[in-house]
Image: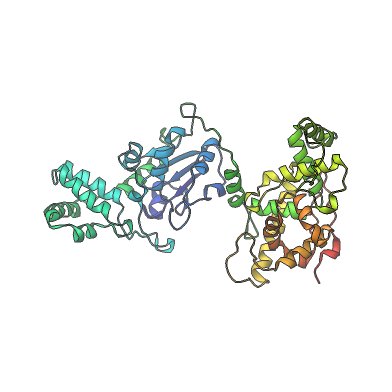
Amino acid sequence: MTDVVFIGPSLPAAEVGRLLPDAVVLPPVAHGDLLRLDVAAGDRVLIVDGFFLQHPPVRHRELLDLLDRGVTVAGAASMGALRAAELWPFGMRGVGEVFRLYRDGVVTGDDEVAVVHGPAEEGHRTLSEPLVNIRVALRRAVAAGVLDAAEAAMLLELGRALPFRRRSYRALERTAPPEAADAVDRFLTWHRRDPGDAKGADARLLLTMAARNAPELCPAHAGDQPIDNLHTRFLDSWRARFAGASVGGQWVSDRDAAAVLMLLHPEVPTWHRRGVLAGLAGVDPADPTVQDRAHEVARRRGLTAAPPGGWDWLTDAERGLDDREAVLRTLVRAFGTTPHRSLALWMVAAPLRTPALLAAARQVAATAAALNETLVPRTAGDRRPGGRLHFRTEVVDAHFARLWGCAVDGLEAAAWDRGFVDLAAFRYAAEPLVAYVKAFGAPALPAVGGDTRAKSLAGSAARAG
């Protein structure tokens, strides 16, 4: 069993090692981090801290995905408590007082657990006090007879009025109005003698429970609400972007591997076409009648010939196609194309997703990334969809037109037939591979259905002068 702990300012990493030896300790969780984990049923993911301003926060579907795979997911103290309070009906386990405050609706604001902290190199040292710690301390002060309930409520509102970046016991003292001065003085005098840290205590509790294999920390089961409608294009897109593998020190995402296969494997147009038509016809892509079956489905739905103005998915040069081929080509392009942001491995035809092909594609992507980092000057500015990383648009187009054996003005149709919705999506995926193509030509990727290696797309002609 593997324990993975996401933690930052709530507890020092060294204390995690003492309380839960052999745990994999990672920084505060952010969007995408869970999708990178190599965990399976029987493993545990324990979330204490998480980012929400510097980086997008961890999404609920990322957590539900782990739960659906039989991974135990538990949270406490900070982001872990917040997400557990939102997802406990589905099997995420929550631990500690902060979790209960959120679960019971006493606390509703994300800002109550927010803190300003230093970088990882400084141990995520806290630079502010979370409001939930102040809240719990005020409750303890009431129980100890230091404050009455009205005074505690007044001081809590004073703390809430402070921006979360400026919250501290000292700021509470400095900003208190005269009528609150006595209550603040009594509270802080008591607190200095008996300090408490609710978030730290909850984090220790979670780790202690994990160390003794407490039965409360268990995977989602039949007693929890079922997880429905989990697998959406959003989750697929996130997994494609964040999941992957390290190759020679280069991280290669599933999206990078998918792009290599879709752009550089010579059999993609054939298998992509068969895969899309098979999905529409409800048959296996290897079925020899797949095109006939798909055409029959189209015919039953009234799609038999192009309208008078023609179809947008056909180029001017394709207007003379016979009706059957025009229908099939339109189906493939209308139902089988995607923007780069939605590109995922599942969109690559199944026969091209073998372990050997994926390993080869990852190697190409890693080599291309290394070339881009070390040999090719970077253009100014951030890379955005439609933007450039290293090469001008005309350079990208010229290299891939040569690679695919088509004219530059036929590039969009060729991109459609490989699964890209438009030239912008194609260029965004293709541009990082131009340096590789210039240096090595088309890679000899393994052929579908055998151990032999596929022929290069264009041989030495793919090399740029």
Name which residue lies at 60% across and 64% down: 383
When the figure is inspected, residue 48 is found, relative to residue 300, above or below; the finding is below
Q: Residue 369: which quarter of the image?
A: bottom right
The residue lying at 68 percent from left, 48 percent from top is: 338
Q: Is residue 235 left or right of residue 336?
A: left
Residue drawn at x 42%, y 35% as measured from the top left? 88
Seen from the viewer's position, the closer of residues 26 and 416 is: 416
Q: Quadrant of the C terminus?
A: bottom right
Q: Quadrant of residue 457?
A: bottom right
Q: Is residue 339 visible?
A: yes
Find residue 266 and report its horizontal and vertical position in percent: 81, 52
Is residue 110 found left or right of 196 in the rendered image?
Answer: right
- Residue, far front: 308
Q: In this rendering, is residue 308 above or below 118?
A: above
Q: Residue 29: percent from the left, percent from the top?
A: 47, 51
Residue for point 46% across, 34% down: 91
Q: Position of residue 142 (x, y in %)?
A: 17, 43
Lateral position of residue 45 relative to residue 336, left or right: left
Q: Nearer the viewer, residue 250 or 110?
A: 110
Picture coordinates of residue 340 (x, y %)?
Answer: 65, 53
